[in-house]
Image (cartoon, rainbow, N blue to C red):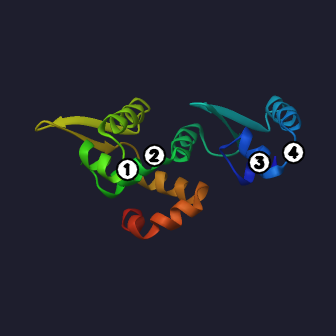
Amino acid sequence: MQFIKANPGTHLRKIKRELNLAMGVIQYHLYRLERERSIVSARHGLYKRYYADQGPRIEERAIVNILFQETERDLILYLLENPQASQKELSQFARISPSSTNWHMKRLSQAGFVEARRERGFVIYTVKGDPGMILSLLRSYHPRIWDKWAERLADLMT
């Protein structure tokens, strides 16, 4: 329970790796904690992430889940820094193919994090939602990444 409080949004294998316990022991305790409503879980893609019940609110959990995905996190941060970026700019920044960028952005759009619109033959993306909340969650749950991006994102916090 203390590990999950200290590491909200963590998944089973990370808990195993960090605590160096047997998988069955971890699964048993996660099941009991979830049944006692001490923790809650949320599935995101292939991962089931765990949160202390008094952890982030449901709408914040979705953002935290996205922030765990490296490419999607980087794309969101780039969009926060460069509002209304084109797909080409995002592809160049992330160093991924346009089709991969399209795939990631479609997922982010379907999840309600970004908005896509056509403008003069280009697809332009903008972040939906509160940039301050996204950055606050990044700072809380990913301090190393926050440190890496802090100087670039500091202006967005003011």
The residue singled out by tag 2 in the image is: 71
Amino acid tagged 4:
Leu
The residue singled out by tag 1 in the image is: 94
Residue 49 vs residue 100, the one in the foreground: 100
From this viewpoint, is residue 119 visible? Answer: yes
Lateral position of residue 146 relative to residue 90, left or right: right
Categorize mark 2 by other alpha carbons within 10 Å: few (<14), some (14-19), many (20+).
Answer: some
**Pointer 1 and pointer 2: residues touching (CB < 8 Å)?**
yes
Lateral position of residue 28 relative to residue 156, left or right: right
Q: CA distance from mark 4 to mark 2?
A: 30 Å
Quarter the C terminus occupies: bottom left
Categorize mark 3 by other alpha carbons within 10 Å: few (<14), some (14-19), many (20+).
Answer: few
Amino acid tagged 3:
Arg
Q: CA distance from mark 2 to mark 3?
A: 23 Å
Local SS, label 3:
helix
Q: CA distance from mark 3 to mark 4?
A: 8 Å
Q: CA distance from mark 4 to mark 1?
A: 36 Å
Local SS, label 2:
helix
Q: Position of residue 120 (x, y in %)?
A: 10, 38
Q: Position of residue 127 (x, y in %)?
A: 35, 45
